[in-house]
Amino acid sequence: MSRSGAGVDFARLYAELGVSPEAGLDAFRRAYRRRVAELHPDRPARAPHDPALLVMLNRGYESVLAFHRGHGRIPGQPVASGREGARARAPSAPGTVVVRGEAVPRRTPRIRVLLLPVLLVIAAIWHWLPEGPAPTATAGLAPAAQLRASAAGPARIQLGMDRATVARLLGEPVARDDADARWIYGPSWLRFECGRLADWYGSRLRPLGHAPHRPTAAERARHPPGPACPEALHPLGKRTHGED
């Protein structure tokens, strides 16, 4: 075999690797890796290390791969005949596939194109969905007691409730102030005066059970503000009732 391929002697290359071009690209790669591993400087070798030989092998390997990308075979390998030969000769560029001997653009499956927007919409809806309702007073009761409580209507917080009752309906808050007068449930909050529920704010992102957004006017009329007590005083000496 004559010298070809940008100054690379493929005959010498194949002889050094102990492989025939008819064996194909996979056999060539295996022989190259095995021979380079034998010549690696970090590996004890029986023969003296030859840097020039290692350079020749690396140049030859790159030239063989470049030739294969352009012709579908390695140098010296016989050209296949018929349809298989046409497929082998047709180069396959990145993003293309060979169809009937011609390189055509690779198409993205339609299902992937349609699925991505659907997943993005589902993720957005899931992110903005409000959290589920907090545990109610029927949680932990026997089945018969739960049935009776459900028949009486959903339990919800009301003005005038003590802290223990509110905790049973909503669960423990994520934070409290030092006087235990304000309970925080994420974006929602409750305020107590003299140990009784005096006001609340229920965010749609974190509903306070079945309670409305704010106490209704009728409920405020049934539970008017009582006399001042120490925990209802602002640090500056002002009443906190009615503050939002």
Image (cartoon, helix red, strand yellow):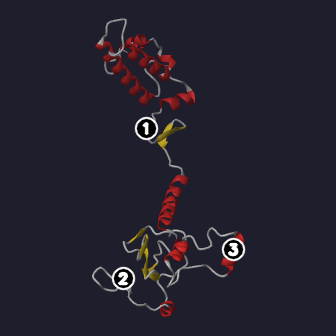
Which residue corresponds to mark 3? Answer: 145
C-alpha span from label 2 to label 3: 38 Å
Camera sees residue 126: yes
Q: Is residue 100 above or below residue 81?
A: below
Q: Secondary structure at mark 2?
A: helix
Which residue corresponds to mark 1? Answer: 93
Q: Is residue 88 above or below residue 77?
A: below
Q: Contact (CB < 8 A) between labels 3 and 1?
A: no
Of labels 2 and 3, earlier in sequence is: 3
Of labels 3 and 1, earlier in sequence is: 1
Say which quarter of the image contains residue 199.
bottom left
* Residue type (three-letter) at the residue carrying disc 1: Ala
Mark 3 neighbour class, 10 Å CA radius: few under 14, some 14 to 19, many 20 or more: few
Q: Which one is nearer the viewer's eye here, 105 or 219?
A: 219
Q: Position of residue 136 (x, y in %)?
A: 58, 73
Mark 1 neighbour class, 10 Å CA radius: few under 14, some 14 to 19, many 20 or more: some
Q: Which one is nearer the viewer's eye here, 184 or 53?
A: 184
C-alpha span from label 1 to label 2: 80 Å
In this view, the residue farthest toward the left is 236
| Quarter occupied by the N terminus | top left
Mark 2 neighbour class, 10 Å CA radius: few under 14, some 14 to 19, many 20 or more: few
Q: Secondary structure at mark 1?
A: loop
Q: Position of residue 44 (x, y in %)?
A: 36, 11
C-alpha span from label 3 to label 1: 72 Å
Q: Which one is nearer the viewer's eye here, 123 or 184?
A: 184
Which residue corresponds to mark 2? Answer: 230
Say which quarter of the image contains residue 152.
bottom right
**Labels 3, 1: front one:** 3
**Labels 1, 2: front one:** 2
* Residue type (three-letter) at the residue carrying disc 3: Ala
Q: Position of residue 115 (x, y in %)?
A: 53, 56
